């Protein structure tokens, strides 16, 4: 049996199999089988769980006929893809006012190619290979079984706009292209002993890595008018965020609200980071008859970020609820879409740096992601990002501790594949990598009913990205 990606890999594997076939037919020896096995080993062959939380198989069959259950794409490639497979947009200047939008739209198109027609089921994409992160099933925020959405963060009141008086939640699923998949193979090829060094210098995600993530919310049109004509997926979620605890899950339709991308682009090296981040906001007002997964095309670019603009200390927040997007003209490493006819009002991040609708307005994409390390010793958000003046609605209007060392450091530029904390191992800006390694470690400790000395030398911080209370991170079910 050939692995199912035989069809996708096209000529390379076809050629290889023909060769093996010829070789096998000439020699007719008993070694033939081992050669076929060698071909199999071009991908990692683990059996990580597909998801963590789901209704029973019987209930699924009776109540949701015709729906699919999520399958983790985990046959990570052991060989680096050829340079000819590098995405074409690596030629578009991402840092020029006239071209950044072309770049980010090309990243979106690259991510959607072959995906929309198969409703984002990675295994069915006939255009290119995309993989998922293992171990996202673990713990109270573990992924659910309809679409593999992992519980992410709370959306505070008014974060999406003035009609949104209650809090909501975000659930998300990430996709990793073939270049990124190679790094995941290096990390997870021995499923019982993942190698955190796969994402640290001299390793790290290779040039050409593209990661995209779809974010869904239980908020709907009644809280944010741009969620009209939604792209909805069923998901098995907690009724409310409840500090990230896993309380009595229910099946609910979730609306696509945001898409995040990150690209390992060599031209970003000169900004001291090596990565380009981009985000999109859903706007169903632009729907014009699109249906199903085709509605993902309603995602409008918010902006792009390739550095933290450490030189700019404009102490500014756009407080919730926002009525318009405010662009900070002093930023040189963030670009924001000025077209308010298409882009719903955005709060953005601290000082107007890039952040999406469900992200915190005192952080930014790159500052949070630069902390990704194993163990996750650094906080995702420094405490100073929660200290400041508030308005009558209780929303932060201005931070007061922005001169603190930890806050300043949070907006420096960090080179890819470099740890944020000296004693940790870099997860190369991937917070799913650091989460997955952390979850795996928890599971292993529980299973062997023991600990390792380095767990006492390098102590992780609970991952809470919104300043909420500590998440109880031990699975007891
Ligand atoms: C305060 C922290 C924080 C901010 C700000 C943030 N993220 Fe993330 N991001 C996370 C965490 C935690 C994860 C891993 C869990 C998950 O996937 O939800 C993640 C996951 C991702 C992933 C999946 C890839 C991976 O392995 O990490 C992408 C892509 C991504 N974020 C892009 C962005 C972009 C683009 C922005 C800005 C618009 C952004 N993020 C803002 C915390 C943050």
Image: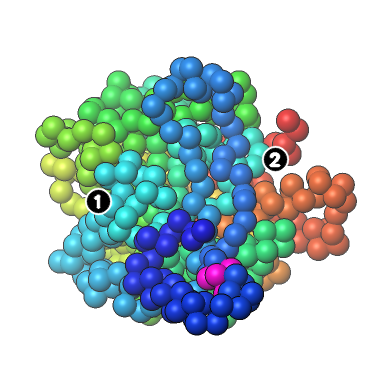
Please indicate, yes or no, whether residue 183 appears anywhere in the rendered image: no
x 55%, y 70%: residue: 36
Please indicate, yes or no, whether residue 35 appears anywhere in the rendered image: yes
Considering only vertical position in the picture, is 5 above or below 168?
below
- Queried on whether the Cβ of the residue with tag 2 lies below 8 angstroms from ligand 1, the answer reads no
- How far is mark 1 from mark 2, CA to CA? 34 Å
Tag on residue 301? Answer: 1
Callout 1: few (<14), some (14-19), or many (20+) C-alpha neighbours within 10 Å?
A: many
Considering only vertical position in the picture, is 23 above or below 97?
below
Q: Where are the magenta residues, as a range?
A: 35-39
x 45%, y 79%: residue: 22
Q: Is residue 166 left or right of residue 133?
A: left
Q: Closer to the camera, 282 or 195?
A: 195
Residue 37 shown in magenta = yes
Q: Earlier in the sequence, mark 1 or mark 2?
A: 1
- Queried on whether the Cβ of the residue with tag 1 lies below 8 angstroms from ligand 1, the answer reads no
x 38%, y 66%: residue: 9
Label 1: which secondary element: strand
The residue that mark 2 highlights is 473
Considering only vertical position in the picture, is 445 above or below 225?
below
Where in the figure is residue 124, as x and y percent of width and height?
A: 37, 49
Where in the figure is residue 310, as x and y percent of width and height?
A: 43, 67
Q: Main secondary structure of the magenta part?
A: helix
Residue 247 shown in magenta = no
Tag on residue 313? Answer: none
Hey, which quadrant is residue 460 in on the image? bottom right
Q: Closer to the camera, 43 or 236?
A: 43
């Amino acid at each position: 049996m050939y692995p199912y990606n035989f069809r996708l890999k096209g000529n390379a594997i076809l050629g290889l199999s023909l060769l093996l076939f010829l070789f096998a037919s000439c020699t007719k020896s008993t070694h033939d089988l081992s050669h076929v096995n060698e071909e199999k080993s071009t991908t990692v062959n683990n059996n990580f769980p597909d998801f963590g939380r789901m209704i029973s198989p019987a209930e699924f069959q009776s109540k949701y006929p015709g729906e699919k259950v999520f399958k983790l794409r985990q046959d990570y490639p052991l060989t680096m893809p050829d340079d000819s497979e590098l995405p074409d947009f690596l030629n578009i200047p991402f840092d020029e006012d006239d071209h950044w939008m072309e770049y980010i739209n090309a990243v979106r198109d690259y991510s959607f190619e072959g995906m929309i027609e198969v409703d984002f089921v990675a295994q069915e994409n006939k255009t290119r290979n995309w993989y998922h992160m293992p171990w996202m099933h673990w713990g109270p925020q573990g992924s659910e079984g309809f679409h593999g959405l992992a519980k992410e963060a709370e959306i505070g009141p008014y974060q999406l706009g003035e009609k949104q008086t209650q809090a909501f939640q975000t659930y998300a699923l990430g996709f990793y292209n073939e270049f990124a998949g190679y790094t995941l193979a290096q990390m997870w090829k021995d499923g019982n002993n993942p190698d955190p060094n796969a994402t640290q210098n001299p390793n790290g995600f290779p040039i050409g890595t593209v990661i995209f993530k779809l974010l869904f919310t239980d908020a709907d049109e009644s809280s944010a008018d741009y969620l009209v004509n939604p792209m909805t997926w069923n998901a098995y979620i907690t009724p409310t965020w409840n500090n990230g605890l896993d309380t009595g899950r229910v099946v609910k339709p979730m609306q696509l609200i945001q898409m995040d991308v990150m690209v390992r682009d060599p031209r970003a090296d000169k900004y001291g980071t090596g990565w380009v981040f981009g985000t999109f906001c859903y706007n169903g007002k632009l729907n014009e008859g699109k249906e199903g997964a085709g509605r993902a095309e309603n995602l409008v670019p918010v902006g792009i970020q390739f550095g933290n603009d450490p030189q700019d200390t404009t102490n500014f927040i756009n407080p919730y609820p926002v009525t318009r997007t405010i662009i900070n003209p002093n930023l040189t490493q963030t670009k924001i879409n000025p077209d308010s006819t298409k882009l719903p009002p955005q709060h953005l991040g601290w000082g107007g740096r890039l952040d999406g609708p469900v992200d915190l307005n005192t952080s930014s994409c790159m500052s949070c992601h630069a902390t990704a390390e194993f163990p996750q010793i650094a906080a995702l958000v420094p405490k100073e990002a929660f200290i400041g003046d508030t308005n009558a609605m209780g929303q932060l209007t201005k931070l007061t501790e922005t001169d603190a060392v930890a806050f300043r450091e949070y907006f420096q530029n960090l080179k890819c594949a470099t740890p944020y904390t000296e004693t940790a191992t870099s997860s190369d800006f991937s917070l799913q990598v650091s989460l997955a390694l952390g979850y795996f470690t928890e599971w292993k400790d529980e299973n062997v009913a023991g600990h390792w000395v380095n767990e006492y030398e390098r102590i992780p911080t609970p991952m809470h990205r919104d300043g909420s209370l500590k998440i109880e991170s031990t699975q007891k079910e």
